Image (cartoon, helix red, strand yellow):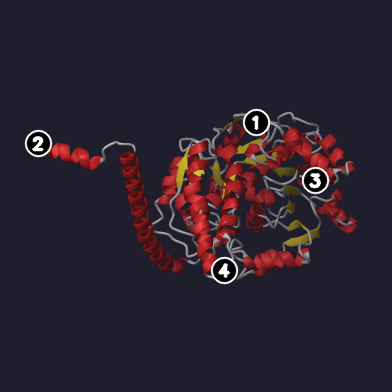
Amino acid sequence: MSLQDFQNNSSPVGEFFAGQTVLLTGGSGFLGKLFIEKLVKCGVREILLLLRTKKGVSPEERIKVLLKKEVIFVNYATQPELYLSRIKVIEGDISKPGLAISNDDLEYIYSHTNIILHSAADVRFDESLHESVLTNVRGTEHLLRVAVKCPLLKVFVHVSTAFSQCVYEHVEERFYPPSVDPFELIRAIEQDTRMEEFEVMAKKIIEPWPNTYAFTKSLAEDVVHQYKDKLPIAVVRPSIVTSTYKDPITGWTDNFYGFNGVVVGAGTGVLRIFHIYDEYKANIIPADIVINATLVAARYAADHPLEENVFNCTTDENYTTWGAVRADCMSQKSLVAAKKSLWIPTYNTTRYQLVADFLAIFYHLLPALLFDLVLRLRGQKAQVLRLYRKVHRFSDVLRFFTIKQFTFGTERMRTVLDQMAIIDRHLFPCDMRSVVWSEFIINQVRGCREYLLHEPWEMNEEALRINRRRTVIHRCMLTVIYLGFGMLALRLLAAAGIPDLRFYLGCTEFAT
């Protein structure tokens, strides 16, 4: 939705945010950038952006570079003050004790904050338990401590994940009891200096959760729940967040995480075999649906503070399958191509892990050795085999979510959506029933090419020409390989004393 749409129309959700001071964590992340764009359009008075110094670059410089760089800030080029006048940078670090915020900044937060949007998290599945707890659990608890000291606070919104409770096949919109006491785990980590020994026990601690991310997000939810009597809170649980559907631009993303990595890997000819159940529901959801649903849920929770405001933001009311997603992606292979590709797209799937592991030898390992040999002969650094090691680690991480069938209750989210004013449905589109999946997947393929591989559409025709040449080479290679296997099979049959096909053909001719 454009800035003019917001300026020309008043709406209940828009008015809830207009003129408010919003404390936002994770503002430099994928969802955080989308939150900034949407909050600016809502006409908030101020966004208090919690950022840390990174690689020697101050938070103030980081946000300036971010605003100039990202196309998602659609009005920045013509109206930079629209953003700069509303953003106040608060230097801090969600993983540090007390969030590492200065006393002066804390006092400003206390006296001005109306809404807190906590979207910061360590989303790495393979992160150590120690680091995940400090960021995702302790960071959330310390932010809640800040929240209780904000007398003007209307709502505290925690962006979690639908897979925080992935140990259950069906997840309701409610809080679940934690497997361990989050506060005891925080104390254990803060007091124990033997981190290596702790990490050895980590796998046992997080069971049956598949990774530290999902485990610590479940603990963070319990921390939020324990503040329910002190604060108006809301927890929003999105499933696998992917690129934008339409708002504010189509197909935008800034990372290779999760499903984006699958799309790019398949489109560039890197990911050629994947262990997945094609008939299972694809729990992916457009990022702009998540952003709008979170803002709408925030307003609802502020108006209904006594309810258990947990909202599953998933695709259960309108879903697609992994097989349909694969078909939609591959439908683009003759229409969209990338120069930064290893080979032509040949994305295959199987429900059997042994088959996937076996085919990976022929689809991944052997081609990687061949490409690296060519690179060495050219005097270049061999790097394709190393790339495939990353691909396989990535596949292993996702496997838990691609071979299991999850369902999510969405009754509370549906209640919120049904109560939305007509104008809010236009300004904050977040009803999954309006998503046309084939359209979304096609736009995601093109968006990943443009925003992740940084190839403008003008380069597509040249990339397609390269792709067509590679297709001819690919088919010729397959013909040679299949003929080779055929000749080998005939020799093996002859060695075993079994007549080959020519014998049977001769018998047939004689009989006729």
- On the image, which quarter does residue 294 sit in? top right
Query: Mark 4 sits on what residue?
Result: 380
Determine whether label 2 and label 1 are within 8 Å by CB: no
Determine whether label 1 and label 4 are within 8 Å by CB: no
Question: CA gap, disc 4 to disc 2?
Answer: 61 Å
Labels 4 and 2: the sequence-earlier one: 4
Labels 2 and 1: the sequence-earlier one: 1
Asked which secondary structure carries label 3, the reply is helix
Which residue does the image show at 61% across and 44% down from the upper left? 293
Local crowd size for mark 3, using a 10 Å CA cut-off: few (<14), some (14–19), many (≥20): many
Q: Is residue 33 above or below residue 298?
A: below
Determine whether label 3 and label 4 are within 8 Å by CB: no
Q: Nearer the viewer, residue 387 or 424?
A: 387
Query: Mark 3 sits on what residue?
Result: 134
Asked which secondary structure carries label 2, the reply is loop
Query: Mark 2 sits on what residue?
Result: 512
Query: Mark 1 sits on what residue?
Result: 167
* Residue lying at the far left of the rendered structure: 512
Question: CA gap, disc 3 to disc 1?
Answer: 22 Å
Amino acid residing under circle 4: Gln
- On the image, which quarter does residue 304 sit in? top right
Comparing labels 2 and 1, the label whose residue is closer to the camera = 2
Local crowd size for mark 4, using a 10 Å CA cut-off: few (<14), some (14–19), many (≥20): few
Drawn side of residue 233 relative to residue 453, left or right: right
Labels 3 and 4: the sequence-earlier one: 3
Residue 56 visible to the viewer: yes
Amino acid residing under circle 2: Thr
Asked which secondary structure carries label 4, the reply is loop
